[in-house]
Image: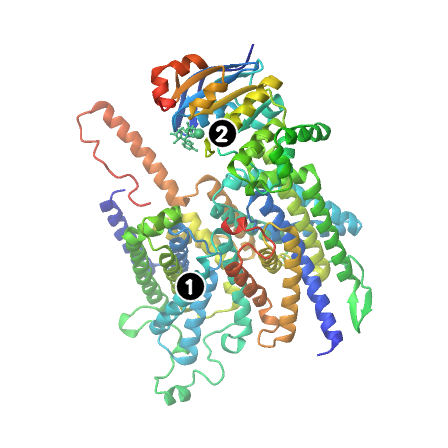
Amino acid sequence: MSLLTLADVRAGYGPVEVLDGLGLRVDQGEIVVVLGANGAGKTTLLRAISGMIPLHGSVCFDDVEVAGRKPEELVRMGMAHVPQGRGTFNDLTVEENLQVGGFARSADEVAEDLDRWLDVFPRLRERRDQTAGSMSGGEQQMLAIARALMSRPRLLLLDEPSLGLAPLITADVFERIAQINAELGMSVLVVEQNANLALSIAQRGYVLETGSIVASGSAEELSADDAIRRAYLGV
Amino acid sequence: MNTRVRWALFVAVLVVAAVIPQIAATGTVNRMSEILWVAVAALGLSLLTGFNGQISLGHGAFLGLGAYTTMILTVDYGVPFAAAGLVAVALAFVVGVAVGLPALRITGVYLALVTLGLATLFPQIVVRFGTITGGSVGRQLLPRPGYGDSELLDRIGQRKFLGQAGFRAPAWTGLADDQWRFYVFLVIAVVAFLLVRNLTRSRVGRGLVAIRDNETAAEVAGVRVDRYKVVTFGLSASLAAVGGWMFAVLNNQVSPTSFTIALSITLLVAAVLGGAASIVGPLLGAAIVVSIREAVPADSQRFSQVAFGAVLIIVMLVAPGGVVGLYRTIEARLRRRGAGGASNDAATSTSTRPDVPGVSR
Amino acid sequence: MTVALFVQRVFDGLQAGAIYAILALAIVVIFRASGLLNFAQGELAMFTTFIAWALLDSGLPWWAATILATVIGFGLGAILYRLLIVRLGGAAANPLAIVIVTIGLFLMLNDGAGIIWGSNPAKVPRLFGDGRVELLGAGISVQVLGLLGVLAVLVIGFGLLFQRTKLGLALRAVTSNPESAALAGIKVVTTLMIGWGLAAAIGSLAGTFTASQNLSVDTNMMQITLIYAFAAATLGGFDSPLGAVIGGLVIGLVSELVVGYVSIIGPDLRLLPGFVLVLAVLLVRPQGLFGSAKVARA
Ligand SMILES: Nc1ncnc2c1ncn2[C@@H]1O[C@H](COP(=O)(O)OP(=O)(O)OP(=O)(O)O)[C@@H](O)[C@H]1O
Ligand SMILES: [Mg+2]
């Protein structure tokens, strides 16, 4: 069953149109990857979905038309967005970051989830009272993901989680995403440039070029495609 | 508007300005003189804020510095007005640089804050040095005790002081005092405006704007950011002091209540309303501000102040470029429509000529 | 120099400083919430003080008038944020534009109050009465002690609000990263409206105390106070409420003592010590004594 469906989505910044009538789908429990080069419009796509920029066209989330709704409403509907560059609250402590992540939830739920994610990410427990700004890039990425999970989302939007991380750390991040997906059945839409790992955990994928989807298929099909291998897998 | 039309308009305005004093009453002429001093000071602010992105809420203090310097030098020491003006300008430049130096490290809102402090401090300094400045009463065309009398001036070999008489029209001109004063102001204003215009269109001017838009990028591009900013602050303060000289010459008196925060804000209103990043903007703004003040009865000035406050807010919300910016937008829109129409029926015409829209910024 | 005179001056300084501290607290709340400075903060306080006075004049007891005016101040601050600052782009706005708009508001409030209530100062009673307490030979007015008490309550209240409540967390999150705050489900505009409202409400208290100290309320009473409050916030650090309060008290003390004991400066140049202090702080330690280094770059 489809959780998120985009149809003919156009969006951009002022007069500049970046997304050019784009459609895609994410099913319940699925990990979907969108591949694209710098400036293809990946970030714009996620910003449009989570209501940070206005859009034309249709975004259906959980069978409700949500185009034009604000981010704070969408969080309450079960959508969480980890922005590019992580978007941690750098002046706040790790614990406070997580509390903000659970802002839309009750205090009891927050306390419960806080413990749970600190168990999953022991590094964060160690640094519980440290400010987010003083942590390493990898730790911040973990924190950003944990913060998004605090809202108990049904759909997690991830913007280039590998950005600026060492390959080993990136692998760790992706492994955890796959794990959480498997355990919770939470859907994930991840946009990436670095396709290797993303395709390894995804079931399906799309290729985005200058604002349009130019190819789609299962992860295996995409990994096997010569053109895609050359463009995004660095082979 | 292309350059030729601009110059024609400039000359036309000058001619009209030159003719009016011949037919208008003294009150009107003095009002026009007032517009000019506000305009010159606002021009200084515009250079600083509009072109260089440094804000000042304290230009009233520089204006006051110029006015007091002029008053004291001419009345007490018999210094000729022109020389007093030069001293005032130099002094303001030095003080402006002194304020501009810390401003290098204090950017944006902090600069607004420090200059606001300066504006508030100025009247207090005046009162503190009351023996020279006349304290809270201020100074008129009356030397302070022991100064300005011919005996002292004779001793130091200077001609008899002319302060008591104020700024009078020389006999050879055959003009009344107010007319003469206005013509002198007009010449000063024209010179100031042309100088600033040429400055902003030069390489230096492009450097100033580059700093305003992105300081780091400007630095990387080889603009000597520190030097530019400090000198701009100094020049801007000097222009305010020129306005102060004109103030003293026009009113023949100065007092601390004339140079409070209110004056600094008035200058800001004139600059912003007219269009801070433009040359004619301050003149237009000054004309509007002085005219509104004039139109409102003296016992209802608070209403014009409220209106000015509203103007500041509305301009920033609706037309941050002020009157000049609004004009440019409309002109550009008309031009685009015109160009669109032309290309429809005449693809072969020369309408694609790059007519550099809005040459000036 | 007698001990009694010194003690007297210290308390005079603290009395003035406590008011600077309260207004500085308002400035810091807004700076923390939105990274902006409101140059109309003092005039807003003056305006709501006039409202309090009008309510008092209409027969309300002073405490009811004060509370009502504070609530109205809250509303004014919130509306101001919603109607003006949001339209300018909120925290992302050009700081110059915010300065100019708040200066416009300064003019409108100042002369608007003059139009509504007249330019002549109106009489106001002392909030804490005329009592005095003897200390080391100096008579300390109950007014000062009451004021310091209110300040302490405010500081503790604010500490708790920011550190212990969900609203405080939201305010800090919005300050730190407005975009992520929205993505976490925080209603950013509403939160900032509350922040600006709180600031205006605190400012309103500063206005009431200034009036009750001067025994009158007039349109220009907050202008010098605003400068001092900015000085206090600069000294303490724009993002530190505690710093603002300490800064306010220090500025009040230093001004009073310098003016009292350094005859070259004297009462005419009352503003100079604070001004010099601020300039020195901005040049040497731009983030203030208690602020975080981040602010310096802002
Ligand atoms: N705030 C903005 N204003 C105007 N144009 C923008 C803005 N943000 C992005 N763009 C433009 O939109 C296009 C797509 O940008 P986007 O950030 O979506 O790309 P991306 O695929 O995420 O790239 P990257 O891999 O570098 O993050 C680019 O051409 C970019 O210049
Ligand atoms: Mg991106």
Label 2: few (<14), some (14–19) or many (≥20) C-alpha neighbours in 10 Å: some
Amino acid carrying mark 2 in the image: Thr
Q: How is the image coloured?
A: rainbow
Task: State ligand 2's quadrant.
Answer: top left
Label 1 sits on a secondary structure element that is: helix
Q: Residue at x 56, y 32 (%)?
A: A142
Q: Is mark 1 within 8 Å of ligand 1?
A: no
Q: Position of residue C86 (x, y in %)?
A: 54, 38
Q: Residue at x 57, y 19 (%)?
A: A181
Residue C60 numbered mark, or none: none
Spatial CA span between label 2 and label 1: 54 Å
Label 2 sits on a secondary structure element that is: helix
Q: Of the residues tagged 2 and 1, which is closer to the observer? A: 2
**Image: C114 above or below A203:** below
In this view of the protein, can residue B113 be seen by the observer? yes
**Image: A208 above or below B320:** above
Q: Position of residue B80 (x, y in %)?
A: 35, 76
Q: Residue at x 47, y 78 (%)?
A: B142
**Image: A168 above or below C228:** above
Same chain for the residues at labels 2 and 1, yes or no?
Answer: no
Q: Quadrant of the N terminus of chain A?
A: top right
**Image: A134 above or below B40:** above
Residue B96 numbered mark, or none: 1
Amino acid carrying mark 1 in the image: Gly
Q: Position of residue B361 (x, y in %)?
A: 33, 45
Parent chain of label 2 = A
Of residues A139 and C256, the one nearer the viewer is A139
Label 1: few (<14), some (14–19) or many (≥20) C-alpha neighbours in 10 Å: many
Residue designated by label 2 = A170
Parent chain of label 1 = B
Q: Position of residue B269 (x, y in %)?
A: 46, 51
Of residues A29 and A107, the one nearer the viewer is A29
